[in-house]
Image (spheres, rainbow, N blue to C red):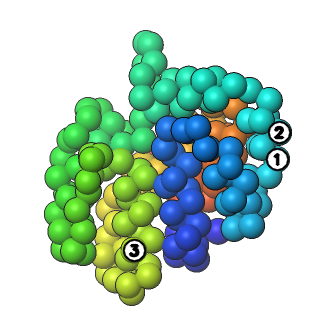
């Protein structure tokens, strides 16, 4: 699986799995199984723990952790070491050119980038998809995915990290 060969629905599933788990999260995962069978091994673990534990792990990985956030799902955090950096502005411009706009989240949030990639694939906007991949995703997503696998306390997030990492193979010149 690479970004170029990934079905847009798979990209949307990955984007959705980055969101904070809500009350219906387990039911949503069960519904995703036909399209994402790789989720199956993670379900027993999530069924055994309280939702609050899953939410706490999500918060620790992606939102707030002391002394350092292990896996900020934002390009600016990885590339500029800050939130809402230059990358966010560049992506907002790319979205405008595609006729899109990031709503309620920073433009450089990984879930938004994956949703954008799905849209660009569906609409045949290959040049913008190539720009999104080469000038943005390839520059930080392999590190993010590796960090997620390395720091996750739940198998669900390790599996998610491997799936995201498979989208863009790591290359030595993007270390």
Mark 3 in CB contact with mark 1 (< 8 angstroms): no
Residue at 68% of width from left, 44% of height from top?
26
The foreground one among 125 and 55 is 55
Q: Is residue 57 above or below residue 125?
A: above
Q: Quadrant of residue 66?
A: top left
Residue at 64% of width from left, 29% of height from top?
51
Q: Which residue is mark 3?
A: 119
Circle 2 residues within 10 Å: few <14, some 14–19, many ≥20: few
How many tags in the picture?
3
Q: Residue furthest top?
A: 67
Mark 1 in CB contact with mark 2 (< 8 angstroms): yes
Q: Quadrant of residue 36?
A: bottom right
Q: Which type of secondary structure does the marked residue at label 1 adopt?
A: helix
Earlier along the polypeptide chain: callout 3 or callout 1? Answer: 1
Q: Which residue is mark 1?
A: 41
Report the quarter where the N terminus lies.
bottom right
Distance from disc 1 to disc 2, alpha carbons, whole Å, reads 7 Å
Image coordinates of residue 111 in percent, x first then y, are 43, 52
Q: Quadrant of residue 92?
A: bottom left
Circle 1 residues within 10 Å: few <14, some 14–19, many ≥20: few
Is residue 154 shown left or right of residue 95? right
Distance from disc 3 to disc 2, alpha carbons, whole Å, reads 32 Å
Could you tell me if residue 135 is visible in this image?
yes
């Amino acid at each position: 699986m690479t970004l170029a060969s990934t079905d847009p629905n798979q990209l949307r599933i990955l984007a959705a799995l980055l969101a904070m788990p809500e009350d219906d999260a387990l039911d949503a995962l069960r519904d995703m199984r036909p399209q994402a069978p790789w989720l199956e091994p993670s379900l027993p673990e999530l069924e055994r723990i309280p939702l609050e534990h899953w939410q706490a792990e999500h918060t620790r990985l992606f939102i707030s952790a002391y002394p350092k956030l292990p896996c900020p799902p934002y390009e600016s955090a990885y590339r500029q070491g800050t939130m809402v950096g230059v990358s966010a502005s560049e992506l907002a411009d790319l979205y405008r050119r595609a006729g899109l706009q990031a709503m309620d989240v920073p433009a450089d949030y990984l879930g938004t980038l994956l949703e954008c990639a799905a849209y660009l694939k569906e609409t045949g906007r290959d040049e913008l998809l190539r720009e999104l991949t080469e000038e943005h995703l390839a520059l930080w997503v392999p590190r993010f995915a590796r960090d997620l696998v390395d720091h996750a306390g739940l198998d669900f997030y390790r599996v998610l990290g491997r799936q995201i990492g498979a989208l863009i193979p790591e290359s030595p010149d993007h270390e």
